[in-house]
Image: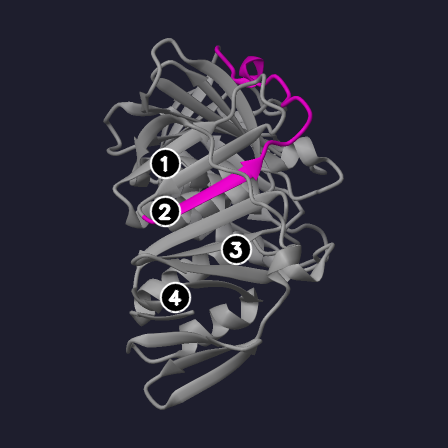
Amino acid sequence: MKFTVDQGALTDGVNWVSRSLSTRPIKTELLGIVIDATGDEVILSGSDLETSSKSFFKADIAQPGKVLVPGKLLAEISRSLPNKPITITLDGSRVLVTSGSAKFTLPTLSISEYPNLPELPETTGVVASDVFATAVAQVAIAAGRDDSLPTLTGVHIEINEETVTLAATDRYRLAVREFNWQPTTPGLSTTSLLRGRTIADAAKSLTGSKNVSLSFAPATSNDRLAGFSGEGKSMTSRMLDGTFPPYRHLLPQEVTTTAIVEVAPFLDSVRRVALVTDKTVPLRLEFANNSVSLEAGAGEEAQATEAIEILLNGEAISIAFNPVFLADGLQAVGTSFVQISFTGSNKPAILMGKSERDGKVIENYRYLLMPMRYAS
């Protein structure tokens, strides 16, 4: 095997595939990336048996062949090389990587022991890559990090014809985002639960493509696979077991108070005031008289207070939030202003974006935040 490829194409492909490699694999071969050079195209693939990735790029192939090399090492080498053509050659049981005067020799792993990777299911629909990346990022921040509760580490995907709804929760907050897409089959309706870290990584990495194709294996399939693909890249991932908790009833219908706040100064204030306390200690907020007062710390400890102007409609309200979760939500709305809707000081609040203070609220994204108790 021998081929030459641009450094950028190789690095991009290797970075994509190496995301699917396990740090603690059940077999040594899963530390590797398969390099398959045939015709005028090189296919790289890697897997941890839960998630599998492939990348494809054109190359000048002098001699076709297939080899398995240590994936993380190949990724580090390709990133460190200068922006010059890279030649990869199989020489016996070693792989030579050459770029200019830089030369590396890599060991090979047993390709005969490498598992067969699953095929990408048939395309279910297509969405613009920037829409998909933004939607996933807005929702994935609310996914749980505790692997002992795997259902809550997932992003729930619900497809109802031309509407896709993403949702994630760690029990303390809930993020829901809707967007439109182009399904390949009319009347399509399905659901899927995918690991939040996996879908967030895939969505972010596929923004180089104009569109992303989403693929969901039918419910009758034994594989329970979902897939994503863009230009020169594809990924499959096994769906999580378990049922995502019902969440729509949590989104309050009756609102007693709304506050419209400029995001940038509010976010700065939240971060400043929270400096005096542990990030799990409540940040107290007092909404009254077209202003919000922020307060943290108590007693003999360090304390901080600050107030900023807002537009308040309805009753005054005192409430407390986890400052990190509040800051996450303010960033996730992605707009200049945020509308915070309240139904009571001990009930969840909803954050939604507004492009302008007096403009319409953007209803396709909602970030629900549970209040915290604090000693008054």
Earlier sequence position, callout 4 versus callout 1: 4
Earlier sequence position, callout 4 versus callout 2: 4
* Label 4 vs label 1, nearer the camera: 4
Where disc 1 sits, the SS reads: helix
Q: Which residue is mark 4?
A: 11
Q: Is residue 238 magenta?
A: yes
Q: Residue at x 52, y 20 (%)?
A: 218
Crowding around mark 4 (Cα neighbors within 10 Å: few <14, some 14 to 19, many 20+) is: some
Disc 1 to disc 2: CB gap under 8 Å: yes
Q: Nearer the viewer, residue 27 or 61?
A: 61
Q: Nearer the viewer, residue 355 or 163?
A: 163
Q: CA distance from mark 2 to mark 3?
A: 13 Å
Crowding around mark 2 (Cα neighbors within 10 Å: few <14, some 14 to 19, many 20+) is: many
Earlier sequence position, callout 1 versus callout 3: 3
Crowding around mark 3 (Cα neighbors within 10 Å: few <14, some 14 to 19, many 20+) is: some
Q: Which residue is mark 1?
A: 132
Q: Is residue 57 magenta?
A: no
Start-end of magenta stretch: 232-253
Q: Which label sits on residue 19? A: 3
Q: Which label sits on residue 199? A: none
Q: Is residue 81 left or right of residue 209?
A: right
Q: Is residue 93 left or right of residue 23?
A: left
* Label 1 vs label 2, nearer the camera: 2
The location of residue 246, given as percent across then percent down, is 61, 17
> What amino acid type is highlighted by mark number 2?
Leu
The location of residue 60, given as percent across then percent down, is 28, 67
Q: Residue at x 29, y 45 (%)?
A: 209
Q: Nearer the viewer, residue 277 or 215?
A: 215
Disc 2 to disc 3: CB gap under 8 Å: no
Q: Which residue is mark 2?
A: 206
Where disc 2 sits, the SS reads: helix
